[in-house]
Amino acid sequence: MMLAPLVAVGSAKVIPALAGEDVMAVEAIAVSTDAEDGTSIEPAIVAVARATSIAVRRLRTTRLRNDIFDPPRLWGERDSGRRCCKGTTDTQPPGPEPVVCRPVVRYWGMRIFFTGGSGKAGKHVVAHLAEQGHQVTNIDLVALGHPGVADLRVDLTDAGETYSALAGLATLEELDLPEKPTYDAVVHFAAVPRIGLTSDTATYAANVLSTYNVLEAATRLGVNKIVFASSETTYGICFAQGDRRPDYVPIDEEHPTVPEDAYAMSKVAGEVTARSFQARTGTDIYGLRINNVIEPHEYAEIFPAFLHDPALRRRNVFAYIDARDLGQMVQRCLETDGLGYEVFNVANADMSVAATTGEILDRFYDGVPVRREMGRDETFYAIDKARDLLGFEPHHSWRDVLADPATVG
């Protein structure tokens, strides 16, 4: 059986649309929403039990940003030319039989194949996804040992192992299901995480080959959502020889990506590979150019030095991403469908230093073009795109733990 999206008509109806033969029962909860301002679409859950299904799939529509995702509607019901997903316009005139604009549907209780979940970043994201009710399988060479998360040891540079793991069971308990479950999403974080841990050739080979294997297996097995970790290093600043400044600030996703180190090269290659697989298959594939990941305990341990000397953070363009906010970012990617291939900068909203934007510009970026007005403490690693397309909004800051020197005394 195939379950079609929930369709919201006007401002007060949610219609479950079903296609298939094995439906045993359908239950729908319809609630009203303000379709004009798009502030929220309250949870609408359709539970479908079917004779040959392995479980009940839950669908839920959540908050949509009206400037990017309009609530689903019939053609001609509201003003034409308003944007549906990814900024496309619904200009088709109404016909005798109304055509439904494609909604954005949020999947909850997803079965997720997560690679690299035992790493510094991955362990926080895995924990976040598990807390959200997802069934996560951690694919790593080292077990995470998180309660409720299955660990599977897989060498992702081996195509056969990768395909077998993605096509197989996560736990012995799944043997009791009427049929073998499939994965709803792949999140690929596994990698040699930087230069200097092994040879450059080994770093590049492991990262590029594992990414190719994961993308090929996922697309061949029909996984509809893939999120992969790229890196801030793609902009060529972090691991540059000597001092390297950006072409302009704030750095957005259109900034050139011509790095010179093996790790960042492997990440650029991963982006190219992902874009090609998306073009081949039409699968939603989102890349995350993740800035320097900070765990909660690290604020007290390492940030006092950054507040004293901002030069320590120049290779990270003075930015950072709280590991908990990274979990939120991945969740937003899983919730948002229909973008095709996209890459997103991932960082917190403020800088990782106490110096102001103006002070950083004067000391480190003198002569670098500033493309727009920036806030007093705003990150130079622009997250506007993630905010606009995904509704991402970081919740954490080093200021939650440490006093800002500018406000003390």
Image: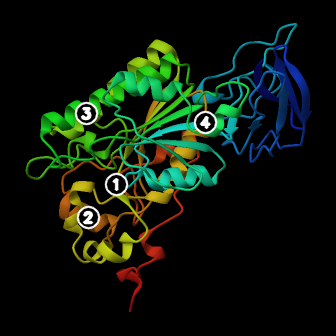
SS class of the residue under badge 3?
Answer: helix
Where's the N terminus, which quadrant? Answer: top right
SS class of the residue under badge 4?
Answer: loop
Furthest-bottom residue in this view:
409
Check contact, mark 3 vs mark 4: CB within 8 A: no
Judging depth in this view, the residue of 102 and 158 nearest the camera is 158
Q: Amino acid at mark 2?
A: Ile
How far is the residue under mark 4 from the one under mark 2? Answer: 35 Å
- Number of numbered discs visible in the structure rendering: 4
Q: Earlier in the sequence, mark 2 or mark 3?
A: 3
Q: According to the image, label 4 marks what residue? A: 336
Dot 1 surroundings within 10 Å: few (below 14), some, or many (20 or more)? Answer: many
Q: Residue at x 87, y 37 (%)?
A: 11
Q: Residue at x 47, y 56 (%)?
A: 124
Image location of residue 115, percent across then percent down: 43, 40
Dot 4 surroundings within 10 Å: few (below 14), some, or many (20 or more)? Answer: many
Q: Residue at x 37, y 42 (%)?
A: 252
Q: Quadrant of residue 15?
A: top right
Q: According to the image, label 2 marks what residue? A: 360
Name the disc covering residue 380, or none.
1
Q: Amino acid at mark 4?
A: Thr
How far is the residue under mark 2 from the one under mark 3? Answer: 36 Å
SS class of the residue under badge 1?
Answer: loop
Q: Earlier in the sequence, mark 4 or mark 2?
A: 4
Image location of residue 117, percent across then percent down: 44, 47
How far is the residue under mark 3 from the one under mark 4? Answer: 30 Å
Image location of residue 147, percent across then percent down: 57, 56
Q: According to the image, label 3 marks what residue? A: 206
